[in-house]
Image: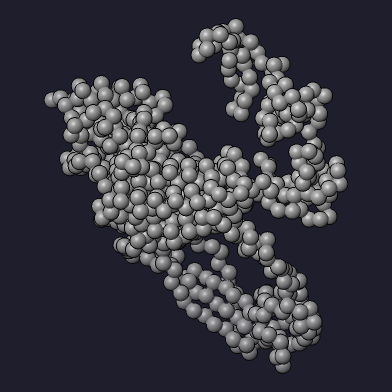
Amino acid sequence: MSNTLVIVESPAKARTIEKYLGGGYTVKASVGHIRDLPKSNKNAVDIENGFAPHYEIAKGKERVVAELGALAKKAGDVILATDLDREGEAIAWHIAETIGLKHPKRIVFHEITKEAIREAIAHPRAIDQNLRYAQEARRVLDRLVGYDLSGLIWKKLRYGLSAGRVQSPALRILVEREREIRAFVPEEFFVLTADVLTKKKEGMRLVCTEEPRERAVAEKIFTAGKGGEWEVRSVEENEAKRSPRPPFITSTIQQAASSRLGFSPRRTMGIAQRLYEAGLITYMRTDSTNLSDSARQQAATVIKKLFGEGLALSREFKGKSKNAQEAHEAIRPTDLSRQSAGVGAEQRKLYELIWNRTVASQMADAKVLRTKVVANIRNGGIPDFAANGSRTLMPGWLLADSAARGEDVELPKVSAGDPLTLVLMHSEEKSTEPPPRYTEAGLVKELEKRGIGRPSTYASIIETIIKREYVVKEGRALKPTDTGDVVSSFLEKHFAHYIGDAFTAEVEDKLDDIANGTEKYADTLRKFYTPFRKDVKSKEKIEKISNLGDADASFKCPICGGSMIIKLGRSGKFLSCKRFPDCQGALTIEGKVMEGPKETGEMCPECKEGKLIERDGKYGKFVACGRYPKCRYIKRDESQTVSSGVTCPTCKKGELVERRGRFGPFWSC
C-alpha cells in the first residue's frame, strides 16, 4: 500500500492526528499560511484584472514548501486536513497551488479524535472554492482599504498611522464611549438605609425605594424615619426558574474567559487552539450552539453519574447569528467523562470552564425563591423602604456551573403588619457615574451585537488597536489614546459611511454570501471598492492637519510668550508655539513646561542654514537639524557603533557595524 501524506497547519495537530492514523500515513504541518500578499502594496492586487491577488511564499517558509513538495511527489494520495473554517480552506488551496497538487483530497472534522479522523478520511471532498474566495475577498479588501486609508492619514495627519476596514469601526465605538464619559455631568443623589430588627431580633437592612436629588428632601425622610415606628407593609415571594446558557461559541468563550479567568481574547483563543490540537475540545471558531447527538448522550451519562437521576435534560439552542458559519457544533470537550484536562494551569482552567458550560447546558432548570419585604413608618408620609433576597430551592444546572450561582441572600421570616425596631438610620450622598469604558469582553459583545467582524476576528481586532497605540488598557478597561481619538475623529469626519455599523455589517454579510455561493468574488469587491477609491481620491484635496486647533488663551509659549496650538505627537497631544519651527516652545496638554530641544552649537552640514539640536525621540536622544521638517538631516552617533571587521555583503565597500534600533542591536553597513 502506497504511503498517504496528510497536511495540517500545526506540528501539535500533526502529532495528535499521526497518533490516531498509525502506519501508512505521514502527517506534516505547513506551520500556518505558506503564502500571502507581499508586504508592499505595489502589484499585490491586480484591480483591473478582477482583483486578482499576487501571492508570494511567506518569508522563512521556503524550506517547508520544498519538503511538502518532495513528500507529495512520493505519496500515493495527498490529504489536506487544515481547519474547517474559511482560513483553513484558503490554507489548503494555497498548499495545493504552491506544490502543484492536481486532485488533492480535502477532509474536515470538528474534533481531533480517532473516530472523527477516520470518518473524515472515509468521506473526502474537493476544496470548497466558495469558502476560499470568501477568505480571499476578506484579505484583499482589508489590504486595499487599509493601504488607501492609511496612505491618506499619513499625508493628512502623521506618518506611521494606520486605519482598517474593521479595526476603525471598533476604535470608533471606544472613542464614542470616551466622549460620553467626557460629556457626562454628575448629579448628586442620596441613598437612605434603615437597619432594623424583627420580632425575633433578626437583622435586616432596608433601602429607600426612591433616591432624592435634593438634600432637604433626604433630610426630611431621614428625620421622619428616625423618629417613626416601623412596620412590615408587605411580603412578596415568587418562585422563578433560571435556565442554563447555551454551550460556548467563539464570542461567548472570549467573554466568559475574560470575566471569570481574566484572559484576553487573544490569550483565550491561543489556549483553546492548543486544547483543540491536543484532541481535548472541538473546533474553537464557531457560531453554532449545537451539540451532536452523541455529545448530548455523553452529557446525560455524566450528569446521572455525578449529580444524580432526574437532572439530565437534552436541550437544543438556537444561535443568534444570522449567518452561523464555519463549524457546525459548539465548543465542547471531546470526552465529557474527563472533567479536567490540559497541560498547565491555563489550559486546565479553560477546559474546566468549557466542561462546566457544556454539561450545565444539558441539565434541568434551577429554581429560585425571590423575596421582597416592603416596610415603612406607621403613619407613612415617606417613600417605602425595601429589602430583596433570593434563595436557591433546587440548584439544577448550577451544580455543574457553580460560579454562575451567586450568593443566597436570605431574609428573615416576617408577615405584613409585623413591627420592626429601628437600630440605625443612615443617609449617604453619592454622585451618578458616567457609563463605564468597555472591557475586552464588553467590546467583543458589542462587536457581535453590531455585526462588526466575525468571531474569528475579534481577538485580532483588539490586538491591532492596542498594538497601534490607539487604545491602552487601564486595569481591564480599554481607553482610547489621544492618537486613537484623533484618527477616529478624522475618519468619522471624512469616511463616516465606511466605518459605520450598517455598512461594516453589510460587507460581512456579502462575504458570507460569497462563502455560500450566492455572490461572486470580483463583483462584490468591485461594488465596494470602486466608490470607496473614488471617495478616498476626493479627499486628497483636503489640507494637511498640522494642528488640532488653538490652545486655551491662558496657555502662553514658555519661550516667546506667544499663542499656542494643539498638536499630535508620538506620545499624544501637546501644546506647541504657533511660530514653530522658528520658536521651539512647547507645553504638555495640561500646561506644564516640556524640556525643549538643546542647541549643540553646530550648523547643519546638509542645508547649511539650520542649527543642530538634540531631541528626545521614541528610542532615545538624537541630534537633528532644527529646521525639521524642511530639512530632515539626522546626525549619526558613531560612538554608538561597534566595528565588526566584516565587509558589507551588499555594497562590498563599507564595513558592518553594530547599531541600536527599535528592536535592539543590529548590524548595518
Q: Quadrant of residue 386?
A: bottom right
68 vs 271, left or right, is left
**What is the count of numbered marks?**
0
The quarter of the rendered structure image containing the N terminus is: top left
190 sits to left or right of 284: right
385 up-or-down from 379: above or below: above
Q: Nearer the viewer, residue 228 or 42?
A: 42
Q: Position of residue 12 (x, y in %)?
A: 37, 32
Residue situated in front as seen by the camera: 434 or 482? 482
- Measuring from the top left, give residue 255's x and y in whole percent: 49, 54
- In the rendered image, which quarter contains the C terminus? top right
Q: Residue at x 71, y 68 (%)?
A: 186
Q: Is residue 626 above or below residue 504?
A: above
- The residue lying at 85 percent from left, 41 percent from top is 559
Residue at horizontal 40%, vertical 46%?
141
Viewer-proximal residue among 587 and 278: 587
For image coordinates 50% across by 46% down, the residue present is 149
- Where residue 194 sits, quadrant-wise, is bottom right
Give how far across and how far down residue 422 sits, in percent: 74, 80
Work out which residue is located at the far left of the displayed protein and give it.
1
Residue 593 shows in the view = yes
Q: Is residue 573 left or right of residue 600?
A: left
Residue extending farthest top: 645
195 relative to 306, above or below: below
- Nearer the observer, 301 or 499: 499
Residue 482, x across and y down, in percent: 65, 49
| Quadrant housing residue 119 | top left
Q: Quick check: can you spot residue 341?
A: no
Q: Which colour scheme is used?
A: one colour
